[in-house]
């Protein structure tokens, strides 16, 4: 079969709406299984929504389920103790709007390459803890009925340099309450993303010392393991891009992999930070684009001590997702892609999420299926392809 011609036909045909069920069609037509895993939990396909402004209410989660996402990471909750105290309360800032802008790469490998970035002022969940728990429960119900995994994201206390005490009460209370919601809907271990926000890179009181960052990476998994529900939580660390060299990014990954009480998986890697840019009266903003994916992919290429990870960072095409796959990722988290102008999508009249899946999977030039089919030809794979197997295969090439 002329796979390129088939992809072109499908790309044009499915601009009216994706086939249902999506995964069955792709398996039967292309011999590609999209079934994958997130933190060891099975997911029907590897494409999900990253935590942020697009996953803070049940209507958004419902639309994502209808569109066919494999998973959704909810807006980041700011942890609290039983009395309601939040050490990271400064991150509970509501966002009033988002700005989608074109951006040009500056790193050597992508210099001049055009891409997109989204800027917003908000950081974490700004409503009450109780409302988040209700939101989590509603989202879990939506996910259970649609086969879409739902994952909470949390920002827990992190000590500043010279601060010796960890506020373990936040870890215990917040994690236990989230697991209680999870247990009402499911009977397996709960994946949980510990968010290291990119805004930490701009807060000199928190991340001005490398040793402090490495301390966080070592201690946070231990503290979560020691909670009363620690044995039933799959711990994921969402690694931010620190304001240091690429070598230090690699050191951060090595610290995670070598840690005796290490996390179960990572999310790599959160956005870059520009301390000089201002938005909505706030100086210092996180950003994405070609520089972000180039830095992430470069660092991941050098990382030899592998552990499971979910990729994030400028995943605006299936080809970029495939590059993360080659470095061991088994799932891909998007945010910016879901905010692009209508002109960037061939599909019209559907939700942004469905349009994104159409572009990611079926685009005949930079789509995910196109990249996998080319890899099958180049590496002499058998006719069937599975995402986890592919993720394990590519790292062995180095």
Image: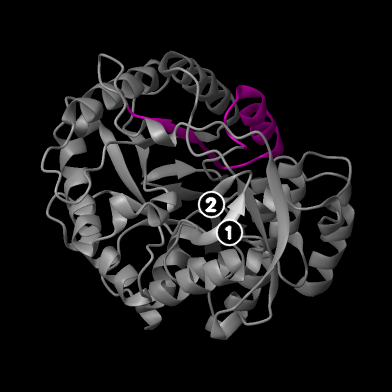
**Quadrant of the rendered image containing residue 56:** top right
Depicted 3 relative to depicted 204: above or below: below
Mark 1 and mark 2: span between their CA atoms? Answer: 6 Å
Please give the label number shown on residue 283.
Answer: 2
Going by the image, does 254 lie left or right of 380?
left
**Quadrant of the rendered image containing residue 367:** bottom right
Going by the image, does 301 lie left or right of 169?
right
Q: If the image is split into quadrants, where does the C terminus sit?
A: bottom left
Is 58 a magenta residue? yes
**Quadrant of the rendered image containing residue 120:** top right
Is 46 a magenta residue? no
Residue beneath the point at 57% across and 53% down = 34
Q: Are marks 1 and 2 in contact (CB under 8 Å)?
A: yes
Residue beneath the point at 58% across and 77% down = 375
Counting from the top left corner in percent of width and height, residue 357 is at 70, 50
As helix, strand or loop, the secondary structure at mark 1 comes to: strand
As helix, strand or loop, the secondary structure at mark 2 comes to: strand
Which stretch appears magenta?
A: 54-79
- Does the rendering let one see residue 304? yes
Q: Which residue is mark 1?
A: 277
Q: If the image is split into quadrants, where does the N terminus sit?
A: bottom right
Please give the label number shown on residue 330.
Answer: none
In terms of depth relative to the viewer, which is nearer, 306 or 82?
82
Residue beneath the point at 54% across and 68% down = 293
Depicted 241 relative to depicted 229: above or below: below
């Amino acid at each position: 079969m002329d796979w390129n011609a088939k992809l072109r036909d499908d790309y044009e045909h499915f601009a009216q709406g994706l086939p249902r069920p999506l995964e069955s069609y792709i398996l039967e037509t292309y011999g590609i299984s999209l079934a994958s895993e997130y933190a060891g939990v099975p997911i029907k396909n590897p494409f999900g929504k990253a935590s942020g402004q697009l996953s803070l209410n049940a209507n958004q989660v419902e639309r994502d389920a209808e569109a066919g996402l494999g998973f959704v990471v909810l807006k980041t909750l700011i942890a609290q103790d039983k009395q309601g105290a939040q050490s990271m309360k400064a991150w509970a800032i509501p966002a009033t709007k988002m700005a989608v802008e074109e951006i040009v790469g500056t790193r050597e490998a992508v210099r001049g390459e055009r891409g997109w970035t989204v800027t917003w002022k908000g950081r974490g969940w700004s409503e009450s803890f109780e409302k988040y728990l209700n939101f989590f429960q509603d989202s879990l119900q939506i996910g259970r009925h649609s086969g879409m995994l739902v994952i909470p994201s949390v920002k827990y206390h992190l000590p500043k340099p010279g601060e010796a005490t960890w506020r373990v009460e936040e870890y215990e209370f917040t994690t236990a309450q989230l697991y209680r919601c999870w247990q009402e809907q499911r009977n397996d271990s709960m994946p949980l993303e510990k968010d290291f926000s990119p805004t930490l890179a701009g807060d000199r009181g928190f991340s001005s010392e490398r040793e402090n960052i490495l301390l966080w990476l070592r201690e946070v998994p231990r503290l979560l393991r020691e909670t009363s529900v620690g044995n039933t939580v799959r711990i994921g660390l969402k690694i931010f891009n620190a304001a240091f060299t690429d070598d230090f990014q690699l050191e951060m990954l090595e610290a995670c992999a070598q840690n005796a009480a290490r996390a179960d998986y990572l999310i790599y890697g959160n956005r870059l930070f520009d301390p000089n840019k201002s938005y909505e009266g706030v100086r210092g903003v996180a950003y994405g684009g070609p520089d972000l994916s180039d830095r992430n992919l470069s660092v991941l290429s050098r990382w030899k001590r592998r552990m499971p990870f979910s990729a994030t960072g400028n995943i605006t095409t299936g080809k970029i997702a495939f590059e993360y796959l080659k470095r061991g990722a088994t799932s891909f988290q998007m945010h910016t892609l879901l905010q692009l102008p209508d002109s960037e999508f061939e599909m019209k009249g559907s939700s942004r999420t469905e349009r994104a899946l159409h572009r990611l999977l079926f685009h005949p030039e930079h789509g995910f299926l196109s990249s996998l089919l080319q890899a099958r030809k180049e590496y002499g794979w058998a006719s069937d392809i599975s995402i986890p197997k592919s993720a394990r295969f590519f790292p062995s090439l180095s």
